[in-house]
Image (cartoon, rainbow, N blue to C red):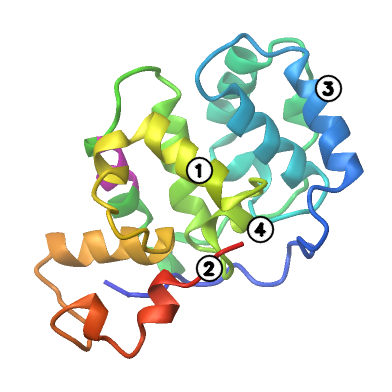
Amino acid sequence: MREVAVTLGSVGRTLQGFPAPAVVERCALLLEFARGLPNDLFLARMIASQAEGFGVMPAGLGLPQEAYSELVARHFPGSGAERWARRVPPPPPEVFPERTDLVALLLEHGAGRDLSERWIAEIVACGCAGGDHLWQDLGLWSRRELNELLWVNFPRLAAKNVFDMKWKKFLYKQLCQREGIYLCKAPSCAQCSDYVMCFGNEE
């Protein structure tokens, strides 16, 4: 189990001044087809960002083609969004073996509100392979939006992040604790010299 996710590389554009007008326009277009389901807005923003080259998500937001087509058909029927994706390959399993564990962790804490939670778990896990803050790698528009996504889909897990740890650090720490692995330098976060790395500002 690794404490830090493997990077997908420099495939995403900078998020300075984000969201760009092209992303906003594409998101608005997609939302015209939305069905009013719990994850419509989050998915629209991630799909629009990926299509315009922001973030590091691979084609289909890391989902298999069939699953991505099902996602688009369920949330944005008739939008044609399955044809928007940049052809960025997903990280190979051998360099991101913890993806399955991350998906399982998220789903164990699912809200049970909507079947799209399975897709969201896969997407969030894939985003953990990026090298920036999780909200940026996913193509969301702010950390606050990532907070909302996790509370909507995995509220019991989100509730455990009582000290507002950075989400990638938090998710990997949860995996380590499940495996009985403790890699932290100090007995408590408040005493740790790496405190800012785990709890610093993500905006």
Sequence-wise, the earlier of marks 3 and 1 is 3
Gap in angstroms between the C-alphas marked 4 and 1: 11 Å
Kind of residue at disc 2:
Asn
Q: Secondary structure at mark 1?
A: helix
Sequence-wise, the earlier of marks 4 and 2 is 4
User: In the drawing, what numbered circle is on residue 123?
Assistant: 1
Residue bearing mark 4: 56
Gap in angstroms between the C-alphas marked 3 and 1: 22 Å
Kind of residue at disc 1:
Ile
Residue bearing mark 3: 29
- Coordinates of residue 132 in the picture (x, y in percent): 59, 68
Up the image or down, 154 lies above or below 185; here it is above
Kind of residue at disc 3:
Leu
Q: Nearer the viewer, mark 4 or mark 2?
A: 2
Q: Quadrant of the N terminus?
A: bottom left
Q: Secondary structure at mark 4?
A: loop
User: In the drawing, what numbered circle is on residue 201?
Assistant: 2
